[in-house]
Amino acid sequence: MTGTQTLLTVALQRESDVVAARQRARELAGLLRFEPVEQTRIATAVSELARNAFLYAGGGLVSFSVEPEQREPALWVVVSDRGPGIANLKAVLSGTYQSSTGMGLGIIGAKRLMDAFQVDSRPGEGTTVRMAKMLPRGAASPDVPDIAAKLARHAPPSPLTEVEQQNRELLQTLSELKRRQEELSWLNRELTATNRGVVALYAELDDRAERLKRADEVKSRFLSYMSHEFRTPLISSQSLCRLLLEEDAGPLTEEQVKQVRLIQKSQQELLELVNDLLDLAKVEAGKTVLRPSAFRVADLFATMRGMFRAVVPGGRVLLRIDDSEELPEMFTDEQRLGQILRNLLSNALKFTERGEVRLWAEPVGGGARVAFYVQDSGIGIPVDEQERIFEEFSQVESAIQKRSKGTGLGLPLSRRLAALLGGGITVRSAPGEGSTFRVEVPARLGSGAAEVEVAAPAARPRDRKVLVIDDDEASRYLVNHALQGTRFQVLEAPDARVGIERACAERPDVIVLDLVMPGIDGMAAMEQLKRDHRTREIPVVIYTSGVLSSEQESQLGRHAALILRKGGSREELTDSIASLAGESGRSGERP
Amino acid sequence: MKLGEFLLVSIQVDMHDKLALALQQDLTDRIAATGARGVLMDISALEVVDSFIGRMLANTAAMSRVLDATTVVVGMRPAVAITLVELGLSLNGVRTALDVERGMQLLRAAVRQPWEEPDGDTPV
């Protein structure tokens, strides 16, 4: 059909679409300038057919078109569906049909309302109803595009449509939300799984750590046990060798003596190794007992000198041990410190073919700590090996290394011992340029460790009392230590107030008084002591590390029996106290 | 809306079929609940009354009669009336009036003479 212009189509999907179709039909009829009665007729006819399509075919399509080019232009309405078709079309059209639902007026009614009416219905294929209404005569030819635009503008007229649209959007949002939620829960599941994995890994790590710790403990126990078990037979075989050499059981031939001496030498080496192992095991097990004592570095160095004199292969290597008179007295475990230095020196000598090995010491931090240096001109240690040498049983690969014997225990043991003394060992070295080992330890072992050694048994009755008034625990300890093995019993007071109380109560033979103390200082304490009749006669030794002005000295001199510098020798202190108390010097050697 | 012993129903929107049935159901329920003697249905807002809506109106009138209430439909547009007749629907049993005022008079009269047969005339 030429010139047919479709104005509008309405899909019939819901019941409300039937209402929409008839409203649109009326609107369109109005725009095409039909009379109000005609508008109602067209709308009613559309309503009837649309309802039929919706009710009997479950949906369909209504389309409106005009044919302005025709001689008698008309509005055509086509209602089509894909339903089962109309079974008794003839009966319906003739008006004789009576629907079981009381209906049946729809098609025939619509036919009556319109000018042209055609029904095409095929069973199983659907029904198409075409009907037309002549456009009003005399009216101007309709402006089709304008009408279409107006219709489009008035489009979704019903609030229901709005609500449905919103409903659809809501449903869409809902399904989107559901999808998101699924995504999230999936993510959550994955995270949970990962988390489980991490937790499992942690547990495994913990387990590993625990096993390592146990293995380490077992190793230490094993070392300790083995060393003990080794030592006993070693020592007895050593004694047997000695017996053999003493020729108690009969003379040995020269060759036999040589052999036994070789056995003895091997035994000695083995014993040293076992001792090192034992020490290491003890340190690791935390069983090492420190025995701090006051000593001078010079004395320690003298011992070293004597010890290594025999060992140094004369000629090519020179061992130099510096004097260290200027160093303060140390209070720490002399034996352990000596062990460290011995290890370092013998190492240095071992790895130095020619040149010099030097040992010296210097105060660090105003004398609070002391650093010992062992320097050699030996083969040196590459930087990447410098940490490894402190590991047990590790040695740097070298030609000398292959020649010299060693267990690789010396350095690790030394480092552990140094740590035990509150210090540490560092090394500075480069291959071919020699090495410098630096041991830094506190000059005074911490007070906690100092308690390790309680009191050596008193050699004789301690019937004389010395009161030490000093806020510094180490100082009190030193005096106490110095007077061990003498007749003096040491009373201690951590400040002047307690000191004066104890002096009044216990009437000591001698009072050792520090000058610089918190609260009442030494000077004021002295005044108080001299005022009180109970303490007036007790000789007071001023024991101070400070430097006194001549004015202070003269002021003190009025009351003090003696002024001693801290850091002086042990004998000086004990002799002074003894003489003041009316004793004749030290009454015995220290045990 | 209840007005004395009458129910006043004003249909303001173009109803789809289910809505029309729901109205019918609702109205009969209210008649039973309130014991109203008359129902006034204002359809002046309806531009299209097709066979379904027309039948609904007729059925509602028949139902309320059974429930002892008289129904008067008022405010029908002329075009609607013409179309209804052309459709072949004469709204038998439905009393009609031009406007609400006349409708109320009709109702009052009907309540006074309850057994009078409705004439079904449509004063256009």
Image: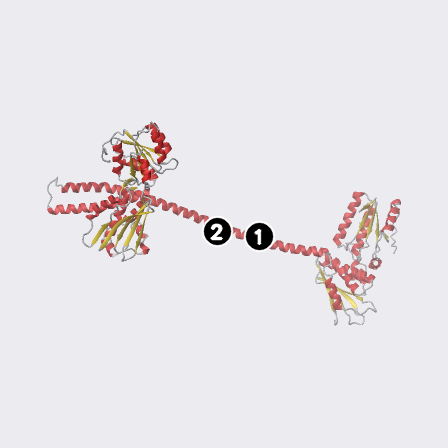
Quadrant where the image shows the N terminus of chain A: bottom right
- Whether labels 2 and 1 belong to a single chain: the reply is yes
Between residues A581 and A403, which one lies in front from this camera angle? A581
For the question of whether residue A120 can be seen, the reply is: no
Where does the image place residue A333, in percent across and percent down from the top left?
29, 41
Q: Which residue is mark 2?
A: A194
Q: CA distance from mark 2 to mark 1?
A: 19 Å
**Which chain letter goes with mark 1?**
A
> Residue A250 vs residue B11: left or right?
left
Q: How many residues crowd mark 2 within 10 Å: few (<14), some (14–19), many (20+)?
A: few
Residue found at x 37% / y 36%: A521
Nearest the camera: A521 or A371?
A: A521
Local packing at callout 1 (Cα closer than 10 Å; few below 14, some 14-19, many 20+) is few
Q: Residue at x 48, y 49 (%)?
A: A195
Query: Does residue A264 show up?
Result: yes
Q: Amino acid at mark 2?
A: Thr
Image mark count: 2
Tell me the residue that label 1 is attached to: A181
Name the subunit of mark 2: A
